[in-house]
Each structure stands twice: as C-alpha cells, then as structure tokens.
Amino acid sequence: MSKQVLNFAAGPAALPREVLAKAQSELLDYAGSGISVMELSHRSKEFEGLLNRAIADVKTLLNVPDNYKILFLQGGGSTQFAQVALNLLGAKEGNSADYLVTGTWSLKAYEEAKRYGTINLAFPLPANKKYVTVPPQSEWKLNPAASYVYYCANETVDGVEFDFVPETNGVPLVCDMSSNILSRPVDVAKYGLIFAGAQKNVGPSGVTLVIIRSDLLDVKQHPATPIMLGYKLMAENNSLYNTPPTFAIYICGLVFEHLKALGGIAEMNARNDRKSQALYAAIDNSNGFFTSPVVPAYRSRMNVPFRIRGGDDALENKFLKEAEAQNMIQLKGHRSVGGIRASIYNAISEDNVTQLVAFMNKFLAANNA
Amino acid sequence: MSKQVLNFAAGPAALPREVLAKAQSELLDYAGSGISVMELSHRSKEFEGLLNRAIADVKTLLNVPDNYKILFLQGGGSTQFAQVALNLLGAKEGNSADYLVTGTWSLKAYEEAKRYGTINLAFPLPANKKYVTVPPQSEWKLNPAASYVYYCANETVDGVEFDFVPETNGVPLVCDMSSNILSRPVDVAKYGLIFAGAQKNVGPSGVTLVIIRSDLLDVKQHPATPIMLGYKLMAENNSLYNTPPTFAIYICGLVFEHLKALGGIAEMNARNDRKSQALYAAIDNSNGFFTSPVVPAYRSRMNVPFRIRGGDDALENKFLKEAEAQNMIQLKGHRSVGGIRASIYNAISEDNVTQLVAFMNKFLAANNA
C-alpha cells in the first residue's frame, strides 16, 4: 500500500484513482487483445472503437450539438494559440480578432495571434500586470467585423474564472477551457471553438481536446499553416490524419466513463461548488492571514491562489514545507505570481479539500502570532 | 495469462514486454512518490530527473557528440515536415533545400516543405510511383547553396532503407529516422538534424525525438513559425517550454534503459541483421511465391513488404486471415501499396521472426499449387 498523497498540482494534475487502477489492470492486455493499448495500431478496430467512444462521451457529457466536431490533437494549449489564429483569422476580410486578456494564458494567446493578423484588446492590460478580475462587459470594445472573439474561461496561474459567457453578437467565440472544462455545464452552442489541454481535468498531458463548429472548418487558412495544424484536415480524418497520441486518448476516454458513472457534469459542478466554497471560506475567515488576490465574483473554482500574511515568503515556505510533510504536494504558486496555489480539479475529492482546509486552519492557529 | 500475440504493426508498434511490465508495476506509485507518473508535474524534480536520464541515455546509446541537443516534441513526423522547413530553410539566402524522395514519407515531407521555400528534388520521382530503390549517388543533383539536404533513412510504407549516409559536402543533412532509429549504429556527427516519431522503435505515439546540432538553432526562422514549432525555444527550455507529453517520455526512457541493459545499439544491430536476413531468405527461397518489390541493396531491415504470387489478393487475404488465427497480427501492407508487410522493430524478437518464417513456409507448402 503506497502512501496517500494529495496532489494539488495545476497540471499535469491528479487523475481519478479508479481510472489509473483500470489502466494498470489492462496495461498488458487491452480488452482481450493480448497487447497493450500502447501497442494498438491507430488504424485497428480496437483503437477506432475507443476513439469513437471517447468522442461520443464528450458529446454526452457536454451535450454537444450535432454541428460540432470533436478532435484530439497534439501540442497543448500553446499550439492552439497559433492554430486558432492560423485557421480562423481569415473568416472576415480584416483578418482581425478581439482578445479578452484576463491572465497569463490569454496574454500568451494574444501575443501569438498578433503574429498572424490584427489583434485588438477588448480592454486594456492591467497597468500593474496583476490579473485579478474581468472588467464589466459594458466597458469592452468589441469589433463587429472581427473574425472571432477569444478568451480563457479560467486562468490557471492567476485564478480568474469567468462566471458568464461573453456576448459577441454573432461573432464566433473561441475559448481556452484547459483548466475548467468538464468542471461545470457549458452551453457549447454559444461557442465557435473550445479547446482544452488535457492535463488538468481531462487526462494526461500530450493531447488537446478541440470542439469546433463545423462551418468554421471552411474558413480560409493562413497560407503558412503547417498541414498538421489544419482543423479541417483533422476533422475530415477523425483525428487520424497521422498517428495520434493513442494512450493519452485512451486515458481521456477512461476519465469520461468515470465522470459519466459519477453522475456527469451536473454532479461535478455541485462538488466543485462545495469544494471551492469550503476553500475560499477558509481564506476569507482567516482575518486576513490568508488572502485571495482575486475579485470574489471571478474567483476560480479550479485554481485557488492565495497569499499568507500579505505575501510573507518565509511563512509561505514554512506552509509549503509542512504541507509536504503531510503529503500535500504541489501547493507552490506559479513562479510568476508566487505564494500558494491549490488546484482542485475534478479528481480532487471533497474530502481532500476538507483535509487541506483542516491543515490551513491548524497552520493559522499555530502561526497567527 | 493473456494469449501470446505477435504484433507486426508498423506503428504504434510492439513495445518490449519488460518495459510494459515495469510501467504497469509502478503505474500507481512512481518511484515511491505515491502518485502516478502521469500525475507528476513537469516542473517536479521527479519528472526533470526522468527527462534528463532519458536525454543522457539517448546520448549514450547513439554516442551523440556534445554539440547536439536532444528534444522531445509533439506532433509526430508529420509536424517535423513543416518544422524542419520553417526552422532551417533560412540557413542560406536562397531559402532552398534538396530532398531525396525514396518513398511515401519523404514525398510527404517534400510536399510540405515546398510551401515554405524552393525545394529541389535530387533525383526524379519514379514515373510509376513505386518506390523500390535509392538511385546511385553519382546521379543526384545536389545544390551546394542549399540550406540542407533531407532524406528518410527508412521508408516504413515502401520498405526502402538507406545502407549509407548521403555525402552532402558540408550542407547540413536532415534525416527522418522514425522507423529505424536505435536499430543500428548512427554517426550522428554527420547530421545536422535527426528526428523520429517514437511509436516504432522508441516508445508510444505522441512524442517525437529530435537530435539537432546546436549551431542550427540560430538559423533565422520563417516569420510565420508558430512559437511551439521553434527548435531553439524548445532547446533553451530543455523541452519544457510548455507541458510535454510526460508519460510518453517516461516510456521512452524505460525503452532506453532496456536497450542499454540488452547491450545497446550494437546488439540491436546484430539481432536486426539476423531477423531481416531470416525473413528475406524465406521470401527469396520461395521460388517466386513470395516476392519483395525492393532492390536487394535497399531492402529495409525494419519493414518488410512482400507480395504473394505477384499480388494475388485472394491469397494474400487468406494469408492474413490464417496469420491472425495464429495470433500474428497487423501483417497487412499499407493501403497505398497493398500486399503484406511485416514490421520487425527492436521489440520483435528473433524467435518471433522464426515463428513468422515457419508460418510462411507452411503457407507456401499448402498453397503453392
């Protein structure tokens, strides 16, 4: 029996134990084939079966309308930053798009897209470079002639999450949901394209889930688009134009089955509400010992960054060290913002959060001199 | 005990049983960490340790000189087709490269590179579109002002393998070794860049091994190069610019350790000589019942395509069906060329090949009416 570890990593993140146990049990013999799932040809009936089940399960879990394609691609969110621009900027003549920059990842997406067209910021970057809120939609400047509007639904580093879907008045909406997909219901019909690097709420690293509205497959690509970065080619080939990351897709499929068995996204949503409320309550009830930098309405339910005594490095290091001694790992904030960060994706149970809160309260009592 | 299956797939291909068993044994608890290797943060000491061991093992196995970088990237060989051109065409003013097209994969690389510069064929494509040989080097037309010379060391579909290293008189040599890397010694110093999709001789799909000479990192990129397709950025970040395919890299690392324990590349080379000789002997000694389409000097030691009775579809289907009944799977030739293909990478043992040869001889005796 190995020790119990609570892994609060931002990604690659904890996976459901049941999924890992299932993968372990059949690692040498997938579904009676006599070979490992890693050894299955991507052209075999067995692999196409598991790929198509994974696609069907995404459609079921997220209630995806029929006019959307589900793709499993490589390269992570960082590749999507270019792929979105290369494939979609040409939708209208101005070759332009509007970006809502609310944190580290949407900023990176913006910087990459600028290399391929005219990219407008819907609102200015924060002067102090700290991302703690979503400006009111009434203040946004959106261009009706934009090819698309881009945003990141949940900023993993900064802990800023949208609690609404931006209104774009018909301009296709593109969203990076890497760190909150499958955590809450999504009205997919409001989106042109959704992507998510798997390594947070979906599966292991090395595969990116893309949900794209079919009409967007016909937008004229940037002429320099590498063939592998064409959504249309991948959609036409059911993600099998070349060899896909087969094992990563398999694990994603096991996660989808697991979520369905637990009650689907509605159940995850309820759990994530309770988990995040418990954690923010511990912060807010600490009399300023713990502080969340994020405006309450936009606090992420997935990634909870906080500081101790306003950013006391020594005390934060003590917290991290004592947490690790309790087998609570990966609580260090992203190096760009410092402090503490607890990522509490679907695979983190309510009991795990209860243990973290108990530890925080104990630490508070011992150190609130 | 699961049935014994001989998996002659071209990729994703068989992996060493010992590697899979090791991965299975520690799937829930990597090196005493209490978590799965899939759950390790790519910024954790554990992951950086396994990544750096994998890099060191590649250097040891292939005797890589110090002025080369080892990268683990995403997107497979098909992404490299663009990435090579985007990163290296600018090495000289003409923005040109010479391509040796000897099969399906070098043809695809050529088609992709043409989108980014002036690409010359060193020798004409075969008029009948059948790739069965390497034209004599005395007939090649190489441009001394080319930025690089590109070739594919082993054509997986067509079964054509170079038995020599092209002489480029100082022009950087770029090679797709996806299907024969680690199967034979390589004088890395003769190359500017080597890449290999892992899913044949290295590991599972979803990761690509790149070996690049450091001076080539400073070539001016095509301005439209997606940031994720920059070799320099990946080299500067030790393949950790973004989240890499951590589990796939881990399995590659286990394969490297396994190969080292077996005696390294010299031992693999000797085994692959014996395996391929046994298989080609069965073909050549069949009095024309089995035929290899490839000129003997360039017959692949990794992928052995052959026809039965000159391409008798019914008989070939019978062969495939009877083989499958013997648990010999994935022997169907690529759909573009038809017939039979046995891929006999490192993970296929000499005994496996002996069993295949015995089956072929039995089939010959029963059907050579």
Image (tube, coloured by chain):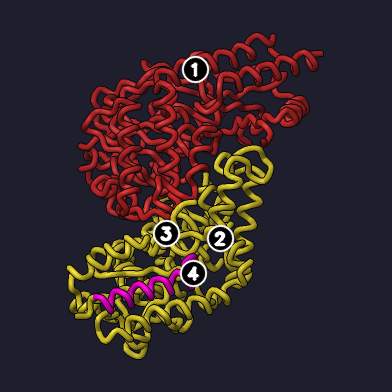
Chain colours: A yellow, B red
Q: Are labels 3 and 2 assigned to the same chain?
A: yes
In the rendering, at what x and y percent does residue A318 appear?
23, 66
In this view, B368 is above or below B315: above
- To which residue does mark 1 refer? B271
Q: Which mark is residue A316?
A: none
In front of the other: label 1 or label 3?
3
In the rendering, at what x and y percent does residue B239 appear?
31, 47
- To which residue does mark 3 refer? A5
Give the left or right position of residue B292, taking residue A327 as reference.
Answer: right
- To which residue does mark 4 refer? A349
- The residue range painted magenta reads A346-366
Q: Nearer the viewer, residue B12 or B261?
A: B261
Which chain is disc 3 placed on? Answer: A
Query: Do labels 3 and 2 touch, CB within 8 Å?
Result: no
Give the left or right position of residue B88, taking residue B272 as reference.
Answer: left
Real-space Cα distance between discs 3 and 2?
20 Å
The tag earlier along the polypeptide, 4 or 2, is 2
Query: What amino acid is labelled 2 in the image?
Result: Val
Query: Do labels 1 and 3 touch, CB within 8 Å?
Result: no
